[in-house]
Every structure is written in structure tokens, then in C-alpha cells.
Amino acid sequence: MVLEVKQPRPMWEILFSTHHTDIGLLYVYLSVTALIIGGALAMAIRVELFVPGPGTLIPDSNTFHRIFTVHGTNMLFLWLIPFASGIGNYLIPIMVRYKDMAWPKLNAVAFWMIPVGAALVWLGFADTTWNAYPPYSIIRAPGPAAEMWIFGLKILGISSVLGAINFVVTILKMKHPDLPLMKTSLFVWSTLVTSIMIIVAIPTFAAALIMLYTDRLGVSGFFNPAMGGDPIAYQHLFWFTFHPEVYIFLIPAVGMLYEIIPKFSRKPIFSYQSGVAAFVLLALVGFASWAHHMYSTGMSFTEKTVFMVGTLAAVPASAMHVFNWIATMWGGRIKFAAPMSWGVGGIVLFFYAGAGGIVNTAMPLDFLTHDSYWVVGHFHLFVAGMVTMAFIGFIHYMFPFITGRMYNERAAMVSFWLFFAGLSIVFLTQHILGLYGQPRRVYDYVPVQPLIIMNQIASVGGWMAGVGAAVFIYNMITSAFKGKPAKMNDPFAIGEQYYDYARREPHH
Amino acid sequence: MGHATIEWIYIGVVIAVLVYVGADAWNVERLLDVSNAPAEAEVVKVTGQQWLWTFEHEDGKKEISELHLVKGKPYRFEVTSIDVIHAFNMPDFATLIDAVPGRINTVWLVPDQSGEYLIQCREYCGFSHYQMRAKLIVEEPTGGSNVTKAAAEIPSKGVTAVSS
């Protein structure tokens, strides 16, 4: 499977292409660029919090708020979602044995909406936080930044819905007739389930964004208590989209691990059926837990109980995936090449994140952890730990197939250990910071010894992860130009079959 | 496949742990629910605004950025906001509730330790969110409070030694 590198092609040919691998490549470039920018913002945050007192690096609190808002928005909507779409673009048509995505032009349109949305988010530099809770976001947040954020998210939402429709149709209608759905790769299942979740979840937030915008204009008062609105209604709409969205970030990473782990363990997947069942279960139950983000808004005991049960019900599905991976690795001849190492590191952090999540959803404990640094540590273990590490592992895995060259294995392992150790230090420490009561989204903290020390440990961990990510990027760029030519039929020397149905259709 | 048994055992163990966590959480939260607040609890009205806290006691006494409570006495906090959402948080007493404009949220507490503690805002609310703090001062009960009154009513034999 040589996807790209037959010969170097002029940039414009890739930019104006509607071929699925070209669009996949554009998605990957864009999302990795977003990862670099978002990572730089995170480094700035950790410098600011290294010592107590304002103005360590960032001159005022408003700039700080803008930085963490754009860091969050950027990482979720410009790194995680586009990257999953990019890999889906590469692999889904190949895995379902079709010549391209179902609608190649729609595919290109969906991609090219992202730079527009990205420009709005980056140039606006809003300070609303990525949740943009009203009334702050409608009566106090400075414009035009907040308007640009709203329109940016609107465009990114439409783009991901278009992409999701394309994936669903490609998988269900364009699949080769000889290939039953239950024989497709689990990555196909993960993309299918994710896409259906996007189509179901995003419209709610799309509506909420419009309401937010008209509220900002002052022509409506959906969420403005001064006009009889209810700010908590926004939180329901928001989390009805964004709790499932957590699984939308997660499930593609799970699908990628189902590609990596059996290959590098040189064993078949322990249980294909259980993987499919867990995907479907997670997609269904994932919609039953959104208000666990809102216990402290004054919900009644009954409501809290309902959403706690809904949240706990989603845990067995995730636990089934972890079991499946461990059982696949068990007794296998594992080769800890870079893709496998990144993936297994992600699974370790996924376990910590899940354990922390159970603490969060237990109602009395949530009042200790909610809106504290605990939560920051918790969800970063998911999105930066599990999902990002699986994604970076998959970049290493795809690298020879895309470039025809091999990355530097030693540099890849150095970047893995720095990133993994750094993430563990920063985010596990942040859990403890939260238990000490440090709220999230603060420009400064009470200058007492335990908080200072733990913030400094967290910053050092954060910088370690930053250096690891920099080594990874450097490795990818230099190896793409100067790496050793890869042995295309088995670049990782593990004696496995990759995708034996090579692509023959010409670019169009 | 033939591997199903071990997976079912594993899922069973996971579910058992979850059921335990859920049941225990349900049980504790039920006791902490505001309907269980003591009837004689003093109502303190807490108002958040960008970027300070105002407290109004039952007797009409108002405090800004400082809250005086008495150890061992039950309190009901009626929390609201006049502009954006804040969150009323006393981390040392594990008390947290959002201050939402247009709503009154209630939370109760019996402070069990005297001393000076932190009150802070835990929901992002703009420019000075990080500085939206107040001081919580929990005082030892003095002559007039419920606890000493109750102690005084107990027949004097055993109490005299304690009352210093």
C-alpha cells in the first residue's frame, strides 16, 4: 500500500485534489499544525503558573483567558477531530474497497471549511473559555472575538457533519458487496460509530450557537436572565453535544489501537465481536450522561442520580476495550516499536483517566473535584494522554506508507518517553492540585507552599511533554526528507500483512 | 472464540465495582441533600458579582468579602449572582454550588473547625476571576450561642469542669 509517494507532486495538485489520500494528507498537515500551536499556548500557560503572582510571562489575566480558550478550542476542534477525519480519509475507502469517498467534492468542501473556521478562532482569540457559558459569553465577553469564536465553531461543526455523512455513506453504501460489515476492520466500525454520533450530537450545539449569537445581539434572551432566559439551558444544550463529543474524540483513537495492537503483538484481536459491541454500547450510553458536568448548578438529587447512573453505565464499554487490548497482547510476541509504545502508553493513561472519571461522577466526590484542577488533569489524561498518544502512534504507523521512508526509531522512542513521562507528571499532579482546591482557569493562585511546589512540578512535566512533542515533530519532518527508504511490504519487520489490497485507481 | 468466560467475569467485576461506587455515592449524597439541612439552620444569603462576594445574615447584618460563622452551628447558604455565573466554594469544607443569576441554589454546612479559611470563585467569570476570593472566619462559640446554652441547661454536675 503506497498511498502517496510515487513521485513528488507540485503543491497545488494536492491542494486542489479531491482524491481521498490527498485530502487525508491535508487534514493531517492542518491538524498537526494545530497541535503545534495549541501546544505552544499550553507551554505559555505552564510558564505563567510556574511561580505565583501575575505577569510571569503573560502580562494580564485577559490575555491568559484568551490563551486557554484558544488552546482548548484549537486542540479539540482543529487537532483531534480533523486528525481522525484525515486518517479516516486515508483508510476508510481502502478498508471498504472503494475507489474514493462516496462524495469526493463534498469531502474537499468539508476539509476547506476548516481553515476558515480555524482562522476565525485564531484571529478572534476569544476569552469565553471553550464552553462559552452564558451570561458571561453574552453580556460580558468582548467582541468581535466572541462572535468570531461562534462563527468559527459553527463552520467547524458543519464541516464535521459533512465529513461524517460522507463516512457513513462510504461505509454503508460503497462497501464492496463481497465484504460484510462484520468482516471490516474495527477502525471502520470506529469511524462509522463516531460519524453517526457526530450527526446526532452536533446539531444541538449548532442551535445553541445561533441562540448565543442572537442573545449577544440583544434581539433574544434565551440564556439571558435579565430578559427572562435561563443560562442553565445553554449548559444542557452544550453538554448534550459535548459529552458524546468526548466519545467522538475517543473512539477513533480506540479504532486506531485496534489496528496497531494486533499487528505489533503478532496475534489476532482477542474478540472482534466484543470490540464492535463496545463501540455500539458506548455510542448509545454516551448520550445518557451529559449533565454529570452540571451537578453543581443546583440540580435536584433525582437528576443527579439519573446522570450518575448514566455515566457509570458507559464505563463497562471502555473497560471492554482495555480488556480486549490486554488480552490481545497477552502471550503475543510484542514488538515495542514506536507505534506500539505510543499506543500502550495511551492505554495506561486511559486507565488513570477512567478511574478519575468514576470519582468525578460519584456525586459527593464531584463537589470536591468539579471546576478544580482535578478536572483539568482528568480530561487531559483522556485527550492528551489516551487520544493524542494513540494518534501520534498512528502517525508513526502510517509514516512509511505515506512518505515511503522510515522515521528514526531512536528519536521516536526518546519523544515517546519524554511525552509519556511528562504527561503523567503534569496531569497526575494536577489531580492533587485540585484536591487542594485550586480552581481551574486561574491566572494566579494562593501563594502557599504546597500549591507552589505542585504547580512547579506540573510545569516541569508539561515542558517535558512539550520537548517530547518537539522531538516528534522534528523526527517526522527530517525523516520525511532524509529518512531511510522503507521496505514497503513490511516496514516494521513484524511479518504481518498490512493492507494487501493495494490502491490502483489513479488520482483524480 | 472460546474466550468469552473470562471476559464475562471481568465485566462482572467492573460492574460490581461500579454498583458499589454508585450505591455509596447515592447514600452519601442523600444525607448531604439540602432537604436534610437542620430546620434551625441560619440562612445566609450569598451573592456573587464580578468580582466579589456579599453575605447577608439572617439578622440583616451584611458582610463583604468576609464571612463570620460559628463553629458547630448549622447554616443554609442561599446562593445567587447578579451578573454572570460564579461558583461559591469553600474548599476546606468541601462546599461548592454555582451562583447562577436568576436562580437561588441552596447548600448547607455545619462548620466543624474554627479558624480562617478561603472562600473562592470556582467558575470562570472574567477578568478578575482568579482574585474573586473572600475570607471565611469560623469562630469558637461564645456565651450566647446555642451550644453553650444547651450545655448550661444540662444539670450542673458534670459540666462545670468543661465550661472553662
Image (cartoon, rainbow, N blue to C red):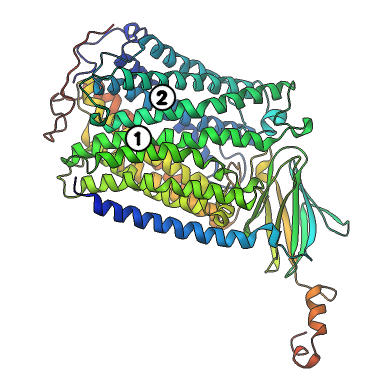
**Which residue type does callout 1 highlight?**
Ala
The x, y position of residue A257, in whole percent, is 29, 37
What residue do we see at 38% from left, 26% from top? A83
What residue do we see at 50% from left, 29% from top? A201
Residue A97 in the image: above or below residue B44: above
User: What distance separates the C-alpha of mark 1 from that of mark 2?
Assistant: 12 Å
Q: In the rendered view of the protein, which quadrant contains the C terminus of chain A?
A: top left
Q: Which residue is mark 1?
A: A253
Q: Could you tell me which secondary element the residue under label 1 belongs to? A: helix
The x, y position of residue A221, in whole percent, is 73, 27
Q: Is residue A65 visible?
A: yes
Q: Earlier in the sequence, mark 1 or mark 2?
A: 2
Q: Horizontally, is A318 left or right of B38 in the view?
A: left
Q: Could you tell me which secondary element the residue under label 2 belongs to? A: helix
Q: Horizontally, is A233 left or right of B104 in the view?
A: left
Asked which quadrant contains residue A488, the reply is top left
Residue B73 in the image: above or below residue B60: below
Q: Which residue is mark 2?
A: A82
